[in-house]
Amino acid sequence: MKLEDIKKIAVIGAGAMGNSIAQVGIMAGFSVAMRDIEQGFVDNGVENIKNSMAKLVSKGKITEDQRNECMSRLHPLVDLEAAVKDADLIIEAAPEIMDLKKKIFAELDSLAPKHAILATNTSTMSISEIAEATSRPDKVLGMHFFNPAVILKLVEVIKGAKSSDEAIQVTYDVAKKMNKIPVIVKKDSPGFIYNRVTAPTGLLLQRILELGSPAPEEFDAAFKPFMPMAPFELLDYVGLDIVYHTQSYFSKTLSPDYVPTKALKAMVDSGNLGKKTGKGIYDWSAGRPQIDTSNPTKEFDPNHMIALQVNEATKLIEEGVCDDPKEIDLAMANGGGGIGPFTLAKSIGYETLIKKCEELADKFKAEVFRPTKTMREGKITV
Ligand code: 3HC
């Protein structure tokens, strides 16, 4: 199969990621079926696409005619069979629950054409395990977008144990046609590249929430000047339920250090999940929260977060998930709009970063924060 053979894409799930991926698909010229289990979810997804398209028209990035042409390629629906029966590529963007994903993939396998590639947008989970629910594991792979998918360039194309080179190449080419920057992840490993590198910073944030100090706003005040979105604000933006599922998955696959704290669980149980529900750590009912930067914490600084990310990135090299530090930097710079960890390590110096990791490992009794052998050697450069 080649790029030219991909004419119709089906996106399974019309939530925050699903509708954004569907939008990217219609804007790249594909016909896209966007499917969810209830008409209300489908309608919300269409509404989000319309709002985003209106933003692009008002900014002069696309014309009214282009918008209308793109929207004519969108086919919102509830009927799964109708959505996938003639699809060439299917991208699943359902909740992060392994049993649910396996059930969906078994259904897709029976309903989709034999040639269709079945991709999952999972944030963290094993592609190989999902693939085992189908009779075509060679055509199952990860195609992981970043939120908001319309803006952020990174797409991780992840190889499962049995994914064929052909399926990986076609998906890579589709991502390029979508005007994205695809990075191939050669080894199926929890969190792949981006979410693995940010795993320990997610852990640090949930431990700080548990301690109750510093307050999220004081913490964010110290970071806001350096990042497109401050750390706690970003948790809300991604969705606290997703953060919870991700950290929970890491607790089973990487280290028990990641077990979600009571504070995070309580927030998820309360139903206040962040931007998508209008309230989370911050109030989003009137749009992006206004973070007061007048009282930043003195206890933490950006080097603490950078140190944890550089350290985790060295684990990806040690474990053979990615053998090129430049690829890791490319992924990190395009998945969240920052600077890659190894580029930062070069300017800050490994000695400073090692001290920060040690300090955090002792303070939070978290061995995942402890510097790796590669980190201590401090030789990786880009
Ligand atoms: N549709 C169309 N345009 C949009 C848009 C949307 N949904 N959202 C933002 N934009 C446009 C705006 O119109 C604006 O355009 P301009 O530059 O021409 O003026 C531009 O994007 C910037 O938006 P804003 O002016 O609203 O300014 P912000 O600074 O608030 O940008 C943001 C919003 C793009 C979300 C930016 O804050 C950002 O990049 N944040 C970081 C997000 C991030 O790190 N995401 C990764 C999360 S991890 C993940 O997704 C993995 C998963 O597995 C969990």
Image (spheres, rainbow, N blue to C red):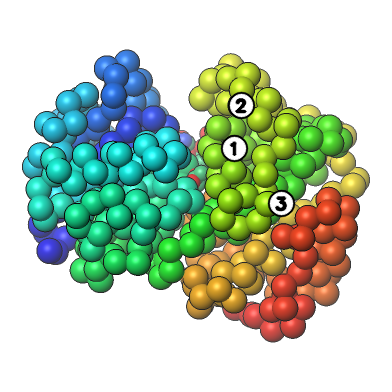
At 32% from the left and 15% from the top, the residue drawn is 40
Q: Is residue 73 left or right of residue 193?
A: left
Disc 2 residue crowd, few under 14, some 14–19, many 20+, Cα 10 Å: some
Identify residue type, mark 2: Val
Secondary element at image label 1: helix
Secondary element at image label 2: helix
Disc 3 residue crowd, few under 14, some 14–19, many 20+, Cα 10 Å: many
Q: Is residue 53 left or right of residue 267?
A: left
Q: Which residue is mark 2?
A: 268
Identify residue type, mark 1: Tyr
Alpha-carbon distance for marks 3 and 1?
14 Å
Tell which of 226 and 175 is nearer to you.
Answer: 175
Alpha-carbon distance for marks 2 and 3?
19 Å
The earlier-in-sequence mark between 2 and 3 is: 3
Q: Can you tell which quarter of the image residue 64 is in?
A: top left
Q: Which residue is mark 1?
A: 244
Image position, residue 178 (x, y; %): 29, 52
Tell which of 200 and 64 is nearer to you.
Answer: 200
Contact check, label 2 and label 1, Cβ < 8 Å = yes
Q: Which residue is mark 3?
A: 257
Disc 1 residue crowd, few under 14, some 14–19, many 20+, Cα 10 Å: many
Contact check, label 3 and label 1, Cβ < 8 Å = no
At 41% from the left and 58% from the top, the residue drawn is 156
At 88% from the left and 53% from the top, the residue drawn is 363
Q: Can you tell which quarter of the image residue 149 is in?
A: top left
